[in-house]
């Protein structure tokens, strides 16, 4: 996923602003003296930086911040819900989603539009995505401080290019530049990243799970991807192409996949295959049929569990991760997958006898990616707030 | 792999000794002034620590160090080939290997004894391993400063226990304690680690490859393991059980593996299977037959390439590693595997079009694990030399 670059010269104040905002983000309700103690900065420096952050709507004092003067000293500080927001955008295979999240992590607005992006050239889809962005920006009277765009394909870290999105049929698209050209985002940071990676971050930061620092989040929708998180940090691989669980070969005799190879997990256990095998039009119907113990639905789900279990055994045998979070469609049918997956893992994972793998159900489901994209944009603001402060002072 | 713990109180001198030895290890031929400049320590501190390190046989001055007095000032410093050595031990499925490496990384002696450890209880094998250690220690008039023991199984990081070694039939063996009881190693540090992990480190440090920092080293012998190295650091997984490539399921209809599951890579493409399919008694004969273009040998190798390619596609799709190093038996037949593996990877790796995977042949082959184990012991001495210095001063 591409990270926003510093816009100008690195200064001491820039570094200190980040320290102060980080301390407030970690401990909402902290006092100025507390920030000073935690950061090692002097109280005078902290006070001055906090005042500027309040003026820039990044921070609020215990009582609503007054725009015309400094906040009150010594009272409790927290990130401002009225400050710059992070905008999350997801270009799904069959939907476009947007989501605005404030600095405190709360969702201010969210929207999902079903669209069949598979039958469309990239150009056409990006026009619709740009329209969705403009609508989201216009909807609320907030400033968008950063944008995260989740795409269902391989994003090269060094260039930020979407190299391939097999389910969209896209290759080598500079999503960032295309969206910048089609919107009024100006020089607002736009990070493009793999949807499965954003989904894993979304689930870690906002899924409400306890003790979730080493895990693999599986985003099972039409495409299947995985976000690998180790010790709280996203693992993307050397070039950003890691986590492609959908293209793990699970059945050497399986059908051809959208990537061109045979018997990939996605071809064996992707959403299209499940629905077709269960003879149902959508996931809602699948869940209803499973609740009724319908034979075809149950058989299709058993087959999914087997192939997904095979792929996850690969993941656990290689990475020794203790936790798997099932997201997307898999989250919807998790109750029917849980035991079967555990059985498969217990047979196939060499270390299973010493450390049983934990399977969790994603609480955000299909929203995880767009939420993670928005939250990533928010975290980028908190990690480098100075441009927002400077803009306020200059303006 | 278990790391040696500090024996006593952490002191400033201990830290500084490590800094000084690290600087000398990184830049052989460096002067005392150079060490001071690189570490930020004063020249007086460096001189005093260097003199102690010379007295302890850890460092030599340009000319052979005199044991009865301080070395000459300003001349070139390097690690001593006569100082404490690292002892590498490998408990293979069908051999026991030992190897002594000096502080500069040179191999002082090496020995491999063919033994069929598969038909033996752990107890029996450990008696032989202890004998091999005693022989290695007695062979040269050097001090053994640390021991690395490579085992073909899962070693739990938190306990150092060998949890399972399917090809040996071992479970829950405290190899470290067993070997300490049976040898005169006293309180010498003993690190037990997975052979595939040690092999990857051995290849990185001593294989002579350029630019080898992100790679997977596949140790294909009777068992198949992988050592995953990212940015120059071994990745072991949360509990130390990562890299179990031998038990990746590659053929859902394949035969049963030693681990109990079906169609694991090891069952489809392990050394026993290759030799059996090629109708040859050993790897030397296999290579001769391949050179003669023998049909059965070629067919067996093609089958190996296919299944190994499937497993490696899993690895690259998940981890996005740019380089694969083929070790063990696979190194011997690498010329016949190379093209076939690349073909398989190019079909199955989603990112292949943007970044072709590089396949290298291990230069250390079956020696990689024991060399890596010895080199790990050496690096542990350099990383914490103080106990060796203190022992000299006290003695």
Image: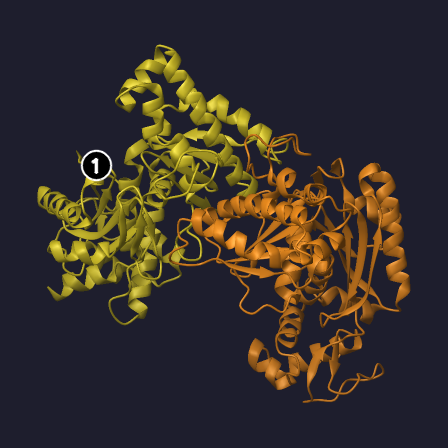
Chain colours: A yellow, B orange
Q: Which residue is mark 1?
A: A95
Quadrant for the C terminus of chain A in the image: bottom left
Residue A110 lies in what quarter of the image? top left
- Residue shown at the point (75%, 80%) measured from the top left: B60
Label 1: element kind: strand
**Residue A178 placement (x, y as % from top left):** 18, 56
**Residue B76 placement (x, y as % from top left):** 68, 86
- Residue A201 position (above or below residue A303): below
- Residue shown at the point (60%, 37%) measured from the top left: B264
- Residue B102 position (above or below residue A249): below
Q: Nearer the viewer, residue B272 or A367?
A: B272
**Residue A321 placement (x, y as % from top left):** 52, 40
Q: Nearer the viewer, residue A127 or A6?
A: A127
Q: Nearer the viewer, residue A345 or B143?
A: A345
Asked if residue B195 lies left or right of residue B125, the reply is: left
Task: For residue B343, say whether it is visible.
Answer: yes
Q: Nearer the viewer, residue B277 or A308?
A: B277
Asked if residue A85 lies left or right of residue A376, the reply is: left
């Amino acid at each position: 996923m591409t990270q926003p670059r510093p816009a100008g010269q690195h200064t001491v104040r820039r570094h200190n602003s980040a320290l102060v905002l980080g301390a407030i983000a970690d401990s909402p309700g902290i006092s100025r003296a507390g920030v000073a103690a935690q950061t090692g900065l002097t109280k005078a420096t902290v006070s001055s930086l906090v005042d500027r952050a309040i003026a820039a709507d990044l921070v609020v004092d215990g009582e609503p911040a007054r725009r015309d003067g400094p906040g009150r000293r010594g009272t409790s500080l927290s990130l401002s819900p009225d400050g710059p927001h992070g905008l999350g955008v997801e270009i799904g295979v069959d939907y476009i989603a947007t989501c605005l999240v404030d600095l405190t992590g709360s969702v201010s607005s969210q929207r999902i539009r079903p669209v069949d992006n598979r039958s469309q050239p990239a150009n056409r889809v990006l026009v619709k995505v740009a329209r969705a962005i403009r609508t989201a920006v216009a909807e609320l009277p907030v400033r968008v401080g950063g944008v995260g765009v989740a795409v269902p394909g391989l994003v090269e870290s060094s260039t930020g290019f979407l190299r391939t999105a097999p389910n969209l049929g896209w290759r080598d698209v500079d999503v960032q530049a295309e969206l910048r050209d089609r919107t009024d985002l100006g020089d607002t940071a736009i990070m493009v990243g793999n949807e499965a990676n954003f989904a894993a971050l979304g689930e870690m930061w906002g899924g409400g799970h306890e003790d979730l620092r080493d895990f693999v989040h599986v985003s099972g929708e039409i495409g299947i991807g995985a976000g690998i998180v180790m010790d709280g940090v996203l693992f993307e691989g050397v070039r950003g192409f890691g986590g492609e669980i959908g293209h793990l070969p699970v059945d050497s005799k399986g059908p051809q996949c959208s990537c061109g190879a045979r018997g990939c997990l996605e071809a064996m256990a992707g959403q299209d295959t499940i629905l077709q095998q269960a003879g149902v039009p959508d996931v809602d119907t699948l869940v209803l049929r499973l609740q009724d113990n319908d034979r075809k639905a149950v058989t299709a789900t058993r087959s999914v569990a087997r192939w997904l279990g095979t792929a996850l055994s690969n993941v656990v045998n290689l990475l020794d991760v203790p936790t798997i979070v099932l997201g997307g469609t898999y989250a919807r049918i998790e109750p029917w997958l849980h035991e079967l997956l555990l059985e498969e893992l217990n047979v196939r994972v060499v270390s299973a006898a010493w450390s049983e793998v934990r399977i969790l159900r994603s609480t955000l489901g299909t929203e995880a990616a767009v939420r993670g994209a928005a939250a990533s944009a928010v975290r980028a603001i908190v990690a480098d707030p100075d441009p927002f402060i400077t803009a306020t002072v200059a303006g």
